[in-house]
Image (spheres, rainbow, N blue to C red):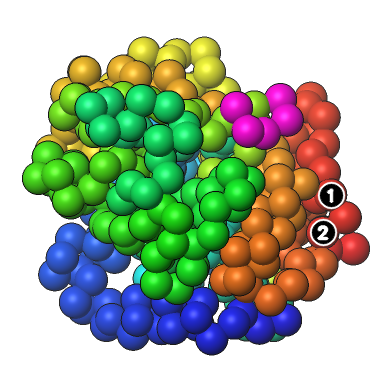
């Protein structure tokens, strides 16, 4: 079913930006090539493709993509088909790039994936795998907020109207019995939609009292003197919830299944390597951030941020359905029909070949 008007307006403002403008801002542009990603001599193209365009954010919650590009896992599996990374700052712009064919496969949060699917009546994308859980915190000014009840009446930043963290905070506020108008952000607590890049400056200036944000923004605020008041993982069963999915353009999935399989195999191998080599993986992710943005994270931010994220091939589909329910409760989304949003057949083929158990789509998969 289609999103509500407020959600449509939120999407439209972002997706209307031309990709040329995004590139000029450093988002949606191709990343610099890396020596670790050179095409091996004698390699053959996958599915006859010259390139596969992979989108992701410069967030540690997208570290599977960061490490996979940096260490050459994707390039190895794709052979002579060149990996072309594209870096984004917001989910709607990545969905627009996917819809326009500027990106083939992407790493993205659950809310934009849900929106992209419902807004296109199930025609634009499929979620084909999981990537990460956790890495989201409520951090606050300890001088102004000493307990959860003190959040009432304060100004709390979220990254964007209707984004994954915005929905999570609105749902948490409702659980406290507080009323907030989702569109304006006004109510018993004031929600200030602020780009993650400028949230630390907003906190330092005193214009916000805290933020519900992903890593590494949360740890950047802590480095500015903020305190972690709540880790979102504590609100979920087994402390696991989807924060990053792998999505694909449906036309690309249909026409180039071997390329999709190669990317998923690389993602599974990357997560396995991350688990076995956490320090080296953390360094590789940080190196990729430096390559993509020109600036690496200092250890005081990188280390605590990395510890709060779990990397997983399981898309944790039941939690995505729950997150959709949170958006409905907040008035940001009409009750969506998510049947078919997942196609996990290729991922489960890859997992079976690796001797691993299959993952489940929680009743939302392609039959």
Give the side of residue 309 with respect to residue 225, left or right.
right
Give the side of residue 237 with respect to residue 65, left or right.
right
**Residue 363: percent from left, percent from top:** 88, 55
- Residue at (50% x, 81% y) in the render: 6
Magenta span: chief secondary structure: helix
Give the side of residue 302 with respect to residue 77, left or right.
left
- Residue at (36% x, 57% y) in the render: 190
Mark 1 element type = loop
Mark 2 is surrounded, within 10 Å at the Cα level, by few (under 14), some (14 to 19) or many (20 or more) other residues, namely: some
Residue 245 seen in this snapshot = no
Compared to residue 20, the image places residue 139 above or below, namely above
Mark 2 element type = loop
Q: Which residues are magenta?
A: 234-238
The reply to whether dot 2 and dot 1 touch (C-beta < 8 Å) is yes
- Residue at (23% x, 27% y) in the render: 143
**Residue, disc 1:** 362
Residue 200, magenta (yes or no) = no
**Residue 300: percent from left, percent from top:** 21, 18
Could you say which disc has been placed on residue 365 in the image? 2
- Residue at (29% x, 65% y) in the render: 28
- Which quadrant holds residue 2? bottom right
Of 192 and 73, the residue lying toward us: 192
Residue 74 seen in this snapshot = yes
Compared to residue 165, the image places residue 247 above or below, namely below
**Residue 12: percent from left, percent from top:** 41, 83
Mark 2–mark 1 Cα distance, whole angstroms, equals: 7 Å
């Amino acid at each position: 079913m289609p999103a509500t008007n407020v959600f449509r307006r939120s999407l439209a403002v972002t997706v209307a930006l031309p990709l040329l403008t995004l590139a000029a801002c450093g988002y949606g542009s191709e990343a610099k090539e890396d020596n670790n990603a050179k095409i091996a001599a004698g390699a053959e193209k996958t599915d006859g493709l010259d390139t596969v365009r992979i989108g992701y954010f410069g967030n540690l919650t997208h570290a599977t993509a960061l490490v996979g590009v940096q260490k050459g896992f994707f390039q190895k599996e794709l052979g002579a088909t060149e990996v072309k990374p594209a870096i984004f700052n917001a989910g709607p712009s990545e969905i627009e790039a996917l819809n326009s064919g500027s990106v083939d496969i992407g790493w993205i949060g659950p809310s934009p994936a849900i929106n992209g699917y419902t807004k296109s009546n199930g025609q634009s994308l499929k979620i084909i795998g999981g990537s990460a859980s956790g890495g989201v915190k409520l951090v606050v000014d300890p001088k102004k907020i000493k307990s959860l009840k003190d959040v009432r009446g304060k100004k709390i930043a979220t990254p964007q109207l209707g984004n994954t963290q915005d929905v999570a905070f609105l749902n948490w506020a409702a659980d406290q019995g507080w009323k907030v108008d989702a569109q304006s952000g006004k109510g018993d607590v004031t929600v200030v939609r602020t780009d993650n890049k400028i949230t630390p400056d907003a906190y330092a200036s005193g214009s916000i009292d805290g933020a519900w944000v992903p890593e590494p923004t949360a740890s950047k605020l802590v480095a500015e003197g903020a305190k972690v008041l709540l880790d979102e993982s504590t609100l979920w069963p087994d402390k696991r919830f989807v924060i990053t999915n792998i999505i694909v353009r449906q036309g690309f999935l249909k026409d180039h299944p071997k390329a999709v399989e190669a990317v998923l195999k690389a993602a599974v191998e990357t997560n396995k390597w991350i688990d076995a080599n956490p320090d080296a993986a953390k360094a590789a992710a940080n190196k990729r951030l430096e390559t993509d943005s020109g600036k690496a994270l200092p250890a005081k931010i990188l280390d605590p941020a990395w510890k709060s994220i779990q990397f997983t091939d399981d898309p944790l589909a039941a939690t995505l359905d729950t997150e959709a329910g949170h958006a409905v409760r907040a008035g940001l989304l009409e009750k969506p029909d998510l049947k078919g949003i997942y196609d996990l057949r290729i991922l489960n083929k890859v997992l079976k070949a690796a001797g691993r158990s299959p993952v489940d789509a929680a009743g939302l998969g392609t039959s």
